[in-house]
Amino acid sequence: MKKLTSTTLFFLGLLFYAMNSMSQTNGNLAPRPPMGFMTWNYFGVNINEQDIKTLADAMFESGLRDLGFNYIFIDDGWQGGRDNKNNMIADPQKFPSGMKALVDYVHSKGMKIGIYSDAAQLTCAGYTASLGFEEQDAKTFAKWGFDYLKYDYCGAPSDWQTAIHRYEKMANALRNSGRDIVLGVCEWGDRQPWLWAKKAGGQLWRTTADVRDKWYSGSKVNKPSELHGRGAGILDILNLNAELSAYAGINGWNDPDMLVVGLYGKKGAPSSDLGGKGCTDTEYQSQMSLWCLMAAPLMITCDVRNMNDATKGILTNKEIIAIDQDPLGKQAVRIINDDVWQVFVKPLANGDTALGILNISNKEQTSNINLNSLGITGLKKAKDLWSKKTIKLDTKNNFKVKVASHETKVYRIN
Ligand code: GLA
């Protein structure tokens, strides 16, 4: 009886907390979904200052920075423990010039830079983490000049209360650090962070287990925790994240994890674990399309110093990126979800509508979509944002278009 009472009280408290969070402002640190390059999928823990500098150079030279990909996110593996005053230090072998120098370099390229830690004693890869040192570590990150912290949850207790408390603690520490630092919550959706992470002080929250460089694990899961260990592909993650559109908005984004575009099954990389054998360019283009429709943070992870034309084409599509970064900040609603089709509708700030049509079957199919039932009526013009062709639409008629297996068509309709 006693246990039941405290559980009930906790969930009532959480409900109050979630409702309250809707009305709270949380600074204006992420008015659009953050975009950039994240080290994890390709490099794992094998990161160093030389690579990060050349990656920043490549982001600049390839034009990706000017398209909005303006962060370099350093993931796990940078840490070298603590000094005799318990200040965190970077691994001196990997970062011989020190973190401050690297941060200054990235800033000099007109980019921002993120760092990584974990709400336990050790990170997921076993490096020094921040539990019990939140204030001190936040000050260190601020002193070095970091603009973002990805805060992971390996090695921490599984209950909700502790998670909320630990994220709040780091969010407060960042707020006290004297620098604006965006907080990315990374507990993989296991405790429904879309209900509490914004109020706790985060600007984005991972909604699933780690993405692998693959299309699909083969069967549907009902909740994020079921994805652990099976290797989440693009479609696995889509299936969960697409349900969460009500929770995303300005300064608080669902994060369905990194883009695997251009990795092509890179051997030895974390993205190749658990069946990450690589995807086709059609599938990579779909991930880009779907992540943009879902207003997701866009974190490139392929080696941007050596992209082929297909990868470059997918990542630098300005009009697709504009769907992601649209100032209205709405995540597309998935209106159709059957054995063949997933259809997404995203309202845009200027009154246009983005329409996404994904064919999940394993052969080419022709759509037959009643646009009126999606709320699209009248005579319209629709621009295919990949082929760049504009067509006239009379929405009285069903919309028919050929879509290849695993392809996503994206239209901007006005
Ligand atoms: C977890 C996170 C990943 C990555 C690794 C680093 O698995 O979900 O995104 O940060 O830890 O160890």
Image (spheres, helix red, strand yellow):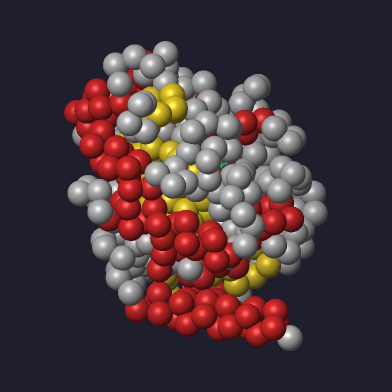
| Residue 95 vs residue 380, the one in the foreground | 95
Residue located 77% across and 62% down the image: 339
Q: Quadrant of residue 92?
A: top left
Q: Quadrant of the C terminus?
A: bottom left
Residue 391 in sight: no
Indicate the position of residue 344 as horizontal and vertical percent values: 55, 65
Whether 251 is drawn above or below 138: the answer is below
Residue located 74% across and 55% down the image: 226
Residue 8 in sight: yes
| Residue 306 vs residue 46, the one in the foreground | 46
| Residue 148 vs residue 79, the one in the foreground | 79
Q: Quadrant of the N terminus?
A: bottom right
Residue located 69% across and 83% down the image: 2
Residue located 60% across and 72% down the image: 335
Q: Quadrant of residue 374?
A: bottom right
Indicate the position of residue 104 as horizontal and vertical percent values: 22, 28
Outermost residue, right direction?
Answer: 219
| Residue 399 vs residue 31, the one in the foreground | 31
Left or right: residue 232 versus residue 80 is right
Left or right: residue 41 versus residue 26 is right
Indicate the position of residue 178 as horizontal and vertical percent values: 20, 49
Ligand 1's quadrant is top right
Left or right: residue 36 versus residue 404 is left
Number of numbered callouts drawn: 0
Outermost residue, front direction?
Answer: 84
Indicate the position of residue 4 as horizontal and vertical percent values: 70, 82
